[in-house]
Every structure is written in C-alpha cells, then in structure tokens.
Image (cartoon, rainbow, N blue to C red):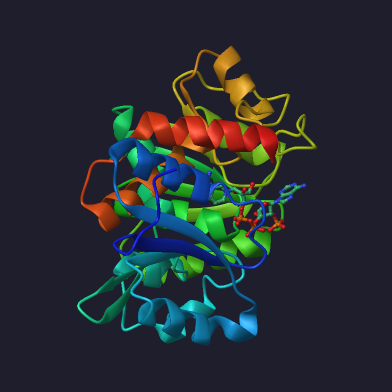
C-alpha cells in the first residue's frame, strides 16, 4: 500500500455494521494500481451519529463517501442536492462533496445498466421480468423503465410488487409497468415474450444456494438474458438454469464492480482499473 502522507485524499464508506464490506479493498487496490494518493476508509457510524459524521467528513476534506445500510434513506436530510435517480429510487449510496455542496447520487441502477451496456445488450424496446420488490428492485426497475424497457415485477408478497409499481409509475412518468405474484403460472405465461430476466430477490444466496426464483417446471427461454444481483455464489442456481438453456448470463459481481468503478471515476477523474477491482472483489468474496 502506498504511504499515507499530508497530500493523501480521503474517501470512505458510512454504514453500520460494515465489517464485511469489500469496498475498501477494491478501491485501495485500484488507487495503488494507478499510483494515486488516495485512501478509502471504512467509517462505522451508528444511526444517531449520522448528521455528525456527515459534518465530520466535510470538515475533514473528504472527496466523497459511499453510504450503505442503514443510512441510505436518512442521509438525504443532510444533503444540499439529490440526483433525479436517487430521488426516484428513494435512496442515496454515493455523496460527492463539490464546491461546498453535498450532492447525493444512487449508483445501483447506473452500475446495473453499465454491466448490460458493456455486453452490448440493448434495453430499449425489450420486455423485462424482475423478480423481487425490495430496495434493489426499485433501482433496477426504475433504471429499466428509463432505458425504455417494458417491465413486469413479480414478488412473493404481491402487495409489495403492486405498491412498488404504483410508486414507480408516478416517479418515472409514462411507462409500461405491471406487477404480480412470483409463482409458476405467472412466469410460464410471460416466459416466451421476455428478453431479460433479473433476480433481485435473495433467492440463491449463500447458504441456501439451491434456491431458485425460476420455477423448475417452466423451460427457460434461450433468448432471454439472465441477470442475477446475488453475487455469493457467483454462479447461482438461476444462472445455471439459464446457461443450461443456452441463454446469456450476467452475475451480481458485475453490478458491484461497475458501481465501484463509477464512484472511482467520479472521485479521481481517471478510468477505473476494472481487472484490479474485480480481482479484489473475487478475493474478498472468498474470504467473507
Ligand atoms: P430487500 O429490500 O430485503 O428485498 C428482498 C427481496 O427478496 C424481496 O422482494 C423479498 O420478497 C425477496 N425474498 C427474500 N427471501 C425470499 C424467499 N425466500 N422467497 C421469495 N422471495 C424472497 O433486499 P435488497 O436490498 O433489495 O437486496 C436483494 C438482493 O440483491 C440481495 O441478495 C442483495 O445482496 C442483492 N444486491 C446486489 C447488489 C449488487 O451490486 N450486485 C446490489 C444491491 C443488492 P418479499 O417482499 O416477499 O419479502
């Protein structure tokens, strides 16, 4: 690691707890690889101290910070400006300190979309099926709608899918968005017309690695790209199903990687060393 000195520029992560975060390793490796005098610090902050922590990182001259659970909503009260996406998604996970202003962004959707773009997958004019209706789904669905896809949200708790659809219809404007239950009948009815299937549920995540949001009795459509947000394990049961049917797949590490890369580029103004960052994510995931 490069020596920290009087010129080191600081960035970090505000969250609670953050013992298992992969971000410091990923960013510090990237700074080192490019010889940049930056340091990324884990900053554990209890909910009651959030306002003081924001004032503190501003006073200490931080370039920016990432924000994670449980602060992604509450942090908005301490910002001067919130990007349109972060407002629509209802959460901030990146703050930029620029010209005495605290500017909140949400990189979940941008990172999600960047992984599709890098694989030359066109979203405009497609039909997407999104499993799940939690925080990650909100970012994914908003982003797909903005990028011109027609989206159906299917969730175990149907009422949650319906209320997410209602909220995003009013946030995203004139869009084609429907909601329903995550069950075999619905998936079977929609499968043939789907171009992209995104799993934003926790199904398939370690330790329940065999759980799969795609119903076993419905053949996976080979034309539909399968994108799983779960990144541990990297190849989930859902991605295996899609791959076996001949479909293209994108794993959850891609979204994590591109979110990190976008933050890195915002802070340093340099292209992120993606290979270095991915290799740190892979190392960290194996040890966490
Ligand atoms: P969340 O807000 O808690 O939402 C969890 C979602 O999973 C809900 O839709 C929930 O359905 C569903 N779910 C949980 N257990 C289920 C089960 N046994 N059967 C069916 N559905 C189930 O969580 P989140 O923040 O959206 O995160 C969701 C996943 O995305 C996590 O695995 C997280 O690690 C991943 N993620 C990845 C990235 C990335 O960069 N790759 C970024 C963000 C999140 P109900 O509404 O019915 O409870």
Q: Is residue 141 visible?
A: no
Q: Nearer the viewer, residue 216 or 68?
A: 68
Count all numbered tags in the image, as a single digit: 0
Residue drawn at the location 46% of the way across and 21% of the way down: 248
Image: 184 above or below 41? above
In terms of depth relative to the viewer, which is nearer, 48 or 44? 44
Quadrant in the rendering for residue 18: bottom right
Residue 215 found in image quarter:
top right
Q: Residue 152, percent across and down?
A: 50, 48
Look at the image and tell me in which quarter the C terminus lies.
Answer: top right
Q: Which quarter shows the N terminus?
A: top left
Q: Nearer the viewer, residue 118 or 60?
A: 60
With respect to residue 166, does 123 lie above or below? Answer: above
Q: Residue at x 60, y 65 (%)?
A: 69
- Does residue 239 appear in the picture of this structure? yes
In percent of width and height, residue 226 lies at: 51, 30
Q: Is residue 134 left or right of residue 88?
A: right
Left or right: where does residue 36 sit relative to residue 183? left
Q: Position of residue 109 (x, y in %)?
A: 40, 52
Q: Position of residue 19 (x, y in %)?
A: 67, 56
Image quadrant where residue 284 sits: top right
Residue ID at (53%, 80%)? 74
């Amino acid at each position: 690691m490069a020596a920290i000195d009087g010129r080191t520029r600081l960035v970090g992560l505000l969250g609670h707890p953050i013992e298992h975060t992969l971000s410091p390793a990923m960013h510090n490796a990237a700074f080192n690889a490019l010889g940049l005098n930056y340091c990324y610090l884990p900053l554990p902050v209890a909910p009651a101290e959030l306002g003081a922590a924001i004032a503190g990182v501003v006073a200490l001259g931080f370039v920016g910070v990432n924000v994670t659970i449980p602060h992604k909503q509450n942090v908005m009260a301490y910002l001067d400006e919130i990007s349109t996406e972060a407002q629509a998604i209802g959460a901030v996970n990146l703050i930029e300190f620029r010209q005495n202003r605290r500017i909140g962004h949400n990189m979940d959707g941008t990172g999600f979309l960047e992984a599709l773009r890098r694989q030359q997958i066109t979203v405009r004019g497609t039909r997407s099926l999104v499993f799940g209706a939690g925080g990650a789904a909100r970012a994914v669905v908003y982003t797909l709608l903005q990028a011109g896809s027609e989206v159906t949200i299917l969730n175990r708790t149907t009422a949650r899918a319906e209320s997410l659809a209602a909220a995003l219809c009013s946030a995203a404007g004139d869009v084609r968005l429907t909601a329903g239950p995550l069950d075999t009948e619905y998936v079977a009815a929609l499968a043939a017309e789907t171009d992209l299937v995104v799993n934003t549920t926790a199904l398939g995540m370690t330790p329940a690695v065999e759980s799969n949001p795609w119903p076993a009795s419905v053949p996976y459509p080979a034309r539909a790209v399968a994108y799983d947000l779960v990144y541990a394990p990297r190849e989930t049961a859902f991605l295996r199903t899609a791959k076996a049917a001949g479909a293209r797949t994108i794993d959850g590490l891609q979204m994590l990687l591109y979110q990190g890369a976008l933050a890195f580029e915002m802070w340093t103004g340099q292209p992120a060393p993606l290979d270095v960052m991915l290799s740190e994510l892979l190392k960290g995931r194996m040890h966490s």
